[in-house]
Amino acid sequence: MSIKTLKIRCPLKISGLTTTTIVARWHTWAGDGHERLVLEEGPDGILAESVLQLQQQQGAAYSASYRIACDGSWRTRKVKVGLIGGSSRQVELASDGNGNWTDGASGALLPHLSGAIDVDISATPFTNTIPIRRLGLKLGQSKDVSVAYISLPDLAVTADLQRYTCLEPGRLYRYESVDGGFVRDIEVDEHGLVVTYPGLFKRI
C-alpha cells in the first residue's frame, strides 16, 4: 500500500504564523468509496474540509461533504455535514469547546450532546484524528470520550461514548465503542491522520 501525503506551506496566516496544509486521501477497505481531505493547521485553529463518495450497504451510491473547525487544542467548535445532490440535506453544529452544543443554523441548545468535546462522522477516518491529537495520550494511557456522532447518509446526531488507548505514541491507537463492543487498532502518521483502519479505511 502506498501512502501519499502532500504538505504545502500555505499563505494563510493565523496570529501571524504560516498555516500548514495537508491533503490526504482514503479508500474504503472494500475499495467502493473514497475521500479527499484538506487539513489546515495553525497554532490557533484547525480547519478540515472534505468530499466523500460512498456506497450504502444496499448498493446505492451517494456523495457528502463536511467542514470541521477546531481550536488550537483540537476541541471541536463548528461542524457542517451535508449530502451533495438530490435533497442536499445538511446538519450544522456549534460547540463552546466545553461540552455545550447548539444547532449551528438555529442556535437552539442540544442538551443530548452535553459533555461531548469531539465530533465523530461515521463515514470518515479523519474524526479519529481529533481525539487522538487532543488527548495526547502516552504509552498505555486510556481515556473515555463523549462525542457528537453524526451518521451518514441519514445525518442523525446522537451522543456516543468511546475509548482511546495509546499502544505506540504517535503511531498506534486502540479505538473502542464503549457501548457497542466495536474495537480496532488504528495506525496513524506523524500528524495523527489514519493510515490503516482495519476493515474500514486505508490511506492511498
Image: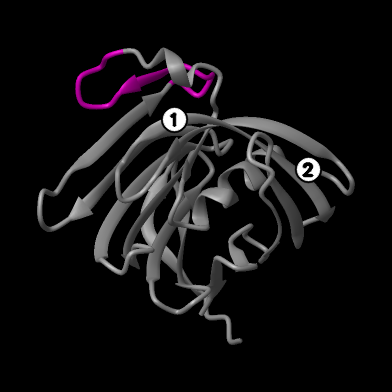
Residue at the spot x=51%, y=55% of the render? 126
Residue 98 is left or right of residue 136, and the answer is left
Residue placed under numbered mark 1 in the picture: 158
The answer to which of 61 and 190 lies nearer the viewer is 61
- The quarter of the rendered structure image containing the N terminus is bottom right
Q: Which residues are magenta?
A: 96-108
Secondary structure state at the residue bearing disc 2: loop
The picture places residue 75, in percent across and down from the top left corner, at: 53, 33
The answer to which of 192 and 106 lies nearer the viewer is 106
Residue 35, image quadrant: bottom left
The answer to which of 145 and 156 lies nearer the viewer is 156
Residue 147 is left or right of residue 143, and the answer is left
Residue placed under numbered mark 2 in the picture: 137
* 171 falls in the magenta region: no
* Mark 1 residue type: Thr
Q: Please name the predominant secondary structure of the magenta segment in the image.
A: loop
Residue at the spot x=33%, y=30% of the render? 93
Give neighbour class at mark 1: few <14, some 14-19, many 20+ (Cα, 10 Å). few
Q: Residue furthest left?
A: 86
Q: CA distance from mark 1 to mark 2?
A: 25 Å
The picture places residue 114, in percent across and down from the top left corner, at: 50, 16
* Mark 2 residue type: Leu
Give neighbour class at mark 2: few <14, some 14-19, many 20+ (Cα, 10 Å). many
How many numbered callouts? 2
